[in-house]
Image (cartoon, rainbow, N blue to C red):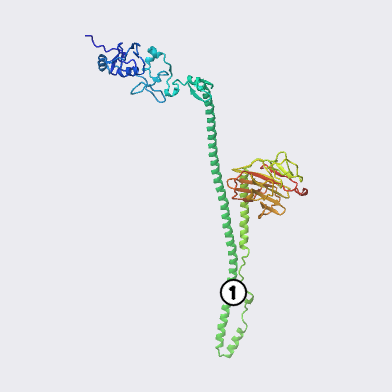
């Protein structure tokens, strides 16, 4: 008997279809061995029954019998017969569709079989003549998705009209009139577009990161501004409290000094009166003793000494008058007011400096100017020419009053601008909302969309309302206008004197706001000086 040969190659125990160790090996009439399941599935998919190895045709499906020798050999040597180790499939890699148990990494995908194969299970496609004709490509997952559902053909073209992937049959029927290109060509176009889109996205990301940083910086500045505002307010209030305390100390000292002087005078009078009372009491005692004497000589001698009383003060003209405190508290408050005015001046100066940080560059809009107004070429000056020009009708133009708006408007945040009013006898300026009436009779009020300061020889008023009449400021040359849209605040400042004039609070801004100027009528030349939008100095 021949000796056992344990050095047989692995191919002697491997199925030609699955290339794995035989499982229930069976033999075909031509003598080739296969796993029962593998050959059965192979024939189920074929019209003719033939051997996958030698291509022998069988008239009828053979009746498969178990290969007893192969089974015994596999049972005996199965532990030593193993397919060479191959890499297992990893994340984002295509698995072998044939492997059972642990799936191996696919080496190729077959566009005829619609399956992916590892190195072991790819061997029939490299050996069997029929399988060699199959189209092998780099491993692809979801091969079913790459097939046309309608024609069961590979999607290898792209319709540029409908922007879908199509097969060759699609171009001959449904897409026959559409421009189509190979997938690779469209892939390159789309990849270029994707690169551009990615660059745009990266730019958007960078812009938003800059926005985030800007917002963070703004929040940091806001916190610093808030801290500074609190510190400045604490400093001012502390100075005021010290002034109040000093005012109270001075008042107490002044009143106490006057009271002390009066009290000292009263004590002196009392002491002097007590001395006189004591002297008179002694004299009274002497008189009582003398009245009881019976000795005529002694009585007459003693009476002579009592006849002339000691000198005494005339107390009818002496009085202790209470001190007068009239004006004492007022004079103390005058000192406090002086201190308060000094602090207010410092506060207004700091407030105006902060407002000026929000300066905006605005120019006058000639399309809104009344026909008699004359604007400078740079749009920074306006005065009344006295004669209305014939201009094309414009819905934005004021036709009854010598008003003009700026080109720029503001619908959020904070803004500030300055207007020179030097040598003017009358003017109006401030802000107005977009929807104000520009043609008929205009009522200047917040309800109608105006927040303005008016000046003439009688004084200054807010929006022409005498209830808000303000004191005239000597030599008012430049007015600053500050608007906090979100807070509903409009403030006016005397820029040269660094003094706050008036603030309108709780304003309801629901539309864009325009800086508003009115130089008023030229009044025969006395009010011909222009209003000038000036940069912050």
Looking at this rendering, what residue extends furthest in the right direction? 524
Q: Secondary structure at mark 1?
A: helix
**Mark 1 nearby-residue class (10 Å; few <14, some 14–19, many ≥20):** few
**Spot occupied by residue 524 in the image (x, y as percentages of width and height):** 78, 49
Looking at this rendering, what residue extends furthest in the left direction? 1
Q: Tell me which residue sits at (56%, 80%) in the image.
A: 281
Q: Is residue 410 above or below residue 168?
A: below
Front one among 159 and 257? 159
Q: Tell me which residue sits at (49%, 23%) in the image.
A: 165
Residue 84 appears in the rendering? no
Relative horizontal placement of residue 204, taking residue 431 as reference (left or right): left
Res 512 → quadrant: top right
Q: Is residue 453 above or below residue 139?
A: below
Q: Quadrant of the N terminus?
A: top left
Res 112 → quadrant: top left
**Spot occupied by residue 14 in the image (x, y as percentages of width and height):** 31, 15
Q: Is residue 232 above or below residue 213?
A: below
Q: Tell me which residue sits at (32%, 18%) in the image.
A: 40
Front one among 113 and 251? 113
Q: Which residue is mark 1?
A: 272
Q: Quadrant of the C terminus?
A: top right
Q: Is residue 119 above or below residue 445?
A: above
Front one among 279 and 79? 79
**Spot occupied by residue 11 in the image (x, y as percentages of width and height):** 32, 13
Res 535 → quadrant: top right
**Spot occupied by residue 63 in the image (x, y as percentages of width and height):** 28, 15
Relative horizontal placement of residue 150, taking residue 305 as reference (left or right): left
């Amino acid at each position: 008997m021949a000796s056992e040969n344990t050095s047989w190659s692995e191919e002697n125990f491997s199925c030609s279809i699955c290339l794995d160790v035989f499982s229930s090996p069976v033999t075909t009439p031509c003598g080739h061995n296969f796993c029962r399941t593998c050959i059965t599935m192979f024939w189920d998919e074929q019209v003719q029954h033939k051997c996958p190895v030698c291509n022998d045709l069988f008239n009828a499906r053979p009746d498969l019998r178990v290969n007893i020798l192969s089974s015994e050999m596999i049972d005996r040597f199965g532990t030593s017969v193993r397919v060479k180790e191959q890499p297992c499939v990893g994340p984002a890699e295509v698995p072998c569709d044939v492997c059972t148990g642990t799936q191996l990494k696919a080496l190729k995908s077959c566009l005829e079989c619609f399956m992916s194969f590892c190195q072991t299970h790819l061997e029939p496609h490299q050996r069997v003549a029929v399988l060699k004709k199959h189209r092998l490509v780099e491993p692809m997952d979801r091969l079913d998705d790459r097939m046309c559902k309608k024609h069961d053909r590979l999607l290898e073209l792209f319709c540029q009209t409908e922007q879908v992937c199509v097969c060759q049959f699609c171009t001959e029927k449904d897409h026959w009139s559409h421009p189509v290109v190979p997938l690779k060509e469209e892939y390159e176009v789309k990849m270029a577009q994707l690169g551009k889109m990615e660059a745009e996205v990266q730019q958007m990301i960078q812009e938003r990161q800059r926005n985030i940083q800007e917002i963070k910086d703004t929040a940091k500045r806001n916190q610093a501004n808030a801290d500074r505002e609190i510190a400045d307010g604490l400093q001012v209030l502390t100075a005021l409290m010290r002034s109040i305390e000093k005012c109270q100390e001075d008042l107490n000292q002044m009143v106490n000094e006057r009271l002390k002087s009066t009290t000292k005078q009263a004590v002196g009078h009392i002491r002097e009166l007590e001395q006189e009372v004591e002297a008179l009491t002694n004299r009274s005692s002497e008189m009582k003793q003398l009245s009881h004497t019976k000795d005529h000589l002694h009585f007459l001698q003693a009476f002579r000494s009592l006849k002339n009383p000691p000198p005494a003060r005339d107390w009818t003209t002496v009085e202790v008058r209470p001190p007068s405190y009239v004006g004492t508290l007022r004079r103390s408050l005058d000192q406090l007011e002086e201190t308060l005015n000094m602090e207010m001046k410092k506060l207004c100066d700091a407030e105006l400096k902060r407002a000026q940080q929000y300066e905006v560059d605005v120019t006058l809009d000639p399309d809104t100017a009344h026909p008699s107004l004359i604007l400078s070429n740079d749009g920074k000056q306006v005065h009344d020419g006295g004669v209305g020009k014939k201009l094309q009708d414009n819905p934005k133009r004021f036709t009854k009053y010598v008003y003009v708006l700026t080109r720029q408007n503001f619908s959020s945040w904070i803004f500030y601008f300055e207007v020179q009013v030097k040598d003017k006898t009358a003017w109006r300026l401030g802000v107005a909302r977009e929807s104000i009436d520009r043609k008929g009779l205009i009522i200047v009020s917040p309800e109608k969309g105006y927040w303005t300061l008016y000046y003439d020889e009688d004084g200054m008023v807010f929006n022409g309302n005498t209830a808000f009449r303000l004191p005239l400021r000597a030599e008012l040359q430049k007015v600053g206008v500050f608007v906090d849209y979100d807070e509903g605040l409009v403030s006016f400042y005397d820029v040269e004197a660094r003094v706050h004039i008036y603030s309108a609070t709780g304003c309801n801004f629901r539309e864009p706001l325009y800086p508003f100027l009115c130089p008023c009528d030229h009044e025969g030349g006395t009010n011909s000086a222009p209003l000038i939008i000036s940069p912050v100095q």
